Amino acid sequence: MIELKSDKLTVEFKTLGGALSSIKDNDGIEYLWQGDAKYWGGQAPVLFPICGSLRDDTAIYVDSEGNESKGTIPRHGLVRKKEFNLVEKTDNSVTFAIEDDQSSYEIYPYHFRLEITYTVIDKTVRTQYKIFNKETNKVMPYFIGGHPGFNCPLAEDETYEDYYLEFEKEETCTVPRPFPETGMLDFNDRSPWLSNQKELDLSYDLFSVDAVTLDELKSRTITLRSRKHTKGLKVDFKEFSNLIIWSTLNKGPFIAFEPWSGLSTSLEEGDHLEDKKNVRLLDAGQVDQIGFDIEIL
């Protein structure tokens, strides 16, 4: 077991997916969803080199000579079910890494290294992604995101509906239409979602179609709070363009707050990664960093 402790938290990790596996406070309250196949077997997967879904799970690549090739990238990318190496552990941080291999190169033709450093200070867990383009002369298009699920309710004598979401700023926004059967979106077919609100009562009805894609928020933090006590958590995603919130239609006792650098493919978009909305283009030999914070209240 890989564990970090601060004065306020005990946090655990696993090499499978290089991911968080537990966040407990000093009262023994578990904040991180522990995974249950009845609802969702995941916990906090790392999404790379795509977030969400591509059309027909297919990316099209063009090499330097203009030749086209295709690769099949499953929903949420290539690394979430792979073993990472534990490369460093300090008193308050742990770093995992993974590199491309032959099977990944065949479907995502870039040599890369992804490092994930988790730092635990006081009541905050920092997730920092470091992306290396190991190519010598090729620009690497990529997306990256987090997908942490949180227990909701946190206590046994509560219900999901005792909780509410609190945004940093008053929000008025719309959300794109999702297509659950393909995972795609329609950026041009949008529905009102918040209207001059900082708070939103939690209800499974929010997820009656699918996850909610928040790509118009002014807020850069979202907080999960209970109406019955003061425990909760806040996610600061200011480095990310988008926040996805999600739970399952069969009333899974969790909620996911997912900072994504990019989004599922929209109906009007093509299939080249470098042409998609919010794509990050990393030059050969360069390194990029992006991260988010989970603060336990």
Image (cartoon, rainbow, N blue to C red):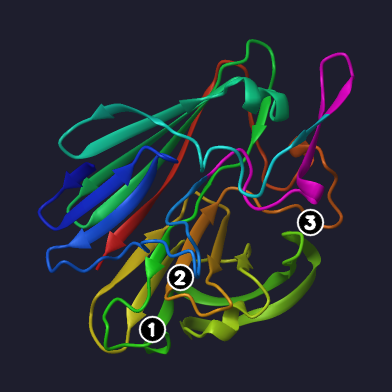
Residue 273: mark in rendering: none
Where is residue 96, by image quadrant?
top left
Q: Quadrant of the N terminus?
A: top left
Magenta run includes residue 96: no
**Which residue bears the numbered disc 3?**
266
207 w.r.t. 48: above or below: below
Instruction: Single out the residue that lies furthest toward the left.
Output: 7
Where is residue 171, by image quadrant?
bottom right
Contact, CB < 8 Å: mark 1 with mark 2? yes
Q: Bounds of the magenta span? A: 47-69
Alpha carbon distance from label 3 to label 1: 31 Å
Residue 255: mark in rendering: 2
The mark that comes first in sequence, 1 or 2, is 1
Contact, CB < 8 Å: mark 2 with mark 3? no
77 or 283, nearer to the observer? 77
**Which residue bears the numbered disc 1?**
163
Q: Is residue 46 left or right of residue 94?
A: right
